[in-house]
Image (cartoon, rainbow, N blue to C red):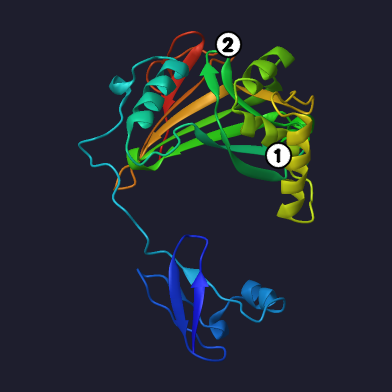
Amino acid sequence: MAVRLRQSLAVSCFIIGRGRYHQLVLHKIRIIPSWKMTNDAQQSKNHSSHAYKVDIGGMRIKYKDKSDCFTEDHLVSKEPFNQFKHWFEIACKTPGVGEANAVFLGTATKDGIPSVRPVLLKSFGTDGFKFYTNYGSRKAKELEENPNAAMTFFWEPLRRTVRIEGTIEKTSAEDSDNYFYSRPYHSQMGSVTSRQSTVIPSRDYLIEKEKELQKQYPDKVPRPDWWGGYILIPKSVEFWQGQSDRLHDRIKFRRLQPGEKPDNVLVHEGEDGWVYERLSP
């Protein structure tokens, strides 16, 4: 009997067999028989009759060649904002990068329990990196009790990543209004309809609520006070470029610490109070 399995890695395959013994080989991905499972997997098996493990250790693609490194002389700026702008503009023009402004936002509770989700960057400059969301969402609640956060951009066709760490603050009501009313009507309606991260009975519930609000606001949707902007004010910005031999290039900008003096060997003097350094991959 053939049973179809769809993995979250966008890999579709067939497992052939009966009972507890299953085998799959596709691009070096294999299902480990249940009798070979670790103790942790055995414990998980107590909660599922279809426990399995997928070995994807053989998945590997070519990154940059040694002739295409990212070195300090390739920096277009000695501060991170213009360097980010340069890489971002390249990403926007690169085929295969669907949304160059898509970024993974990492937050944590006051107890340090982390969570990550994609958001869309909507503005950036020397003041920081802006995005907009529901102030009642999980990320908003975590930011309220712990403003430390991180962003990661991953532009896969370029083999480039930008990691930003810092603190997040709410933007002004005026700023939130300006962005909200620049959005298409259906986007405004979606923001008002959804109380992000709350549990709902079904998708139909959302559709019916949207219809009610469309009748109430046929032309202009008022921005709710529980929706608005945030800005991440960076303390460090790291630019990463992948190499096939795994000797990746990492150049990190950070703020100069009180009393610290760049030696221009390990810590290089930048601009506007920033220094930069190369990190081991």
**In the rendered image, which quarter contains the C terminus?**
top left
User: Between residues 200 and 234, which one lies in front from this camera angle?
Assistant: 200
Q: Position of residue 106 (x, y in %)?
A: 62, 38
Q: Position of residue 239 (x, y in %)?
A: 42, 30
Q: Is residue 237 above or below residue 47?
A: above
Q: Are marks 2 and 1 in contact (CB under 8 Å)?
A: no
Q: Residue at x 56, y 88 (%)?
A: 20
Q: Quadrant of residue 202?
A: bottom right
Q: Residue at x 74, y 41 (%)?
A: 211
Q: Which mark is residue 108?
A: 1
Local SS, label 2: loop
Neighbourhood count class around disc 2 (C-alpha, 10 Å): few under 14, some 14–19, many 20 upward? few
Q: Is residue 142 visible?
A: no
Q: Is residue 255 above or below residue 99?
A: above
Local SS, label 1: strand
Q: Which mark is residue 241?
A: none
User: Between residues 93 and 22, which one lies in front from this camera angle?
Assistant: 93
Q: Residue at x 44, y 33 (%)?
A: 100
CA gap, disc 2 to disc 1?
31 Å
In this view, which residue lies farthest toward the top? 272
Q: Residue at x 29, y 22 (%)?
A: 74
Number of numbered discs overlaid on the protein picture: 2
Q: Is residue 129 visible?
A: yes
Neighbourhood count class around disc 1 (C-alpha, 10 Å): few under 14, some 14–19, many 20 upward? many
Q: Position of residue 132 (x, y in %)?
A: 65, 28
Q: Mark 2: which amino acid? A: Gly
In this view, which residue lies farthest toward the left? 67
Q: Quadrant of residue 226?
A: top right
Foreground tag (2 vs 1): 1
Question: Left or right: where does residue 269 sit relative to residue 256?
Answer: left
Q: Mark 1: which amino acid? A: Ala
Residue at label 2? 259
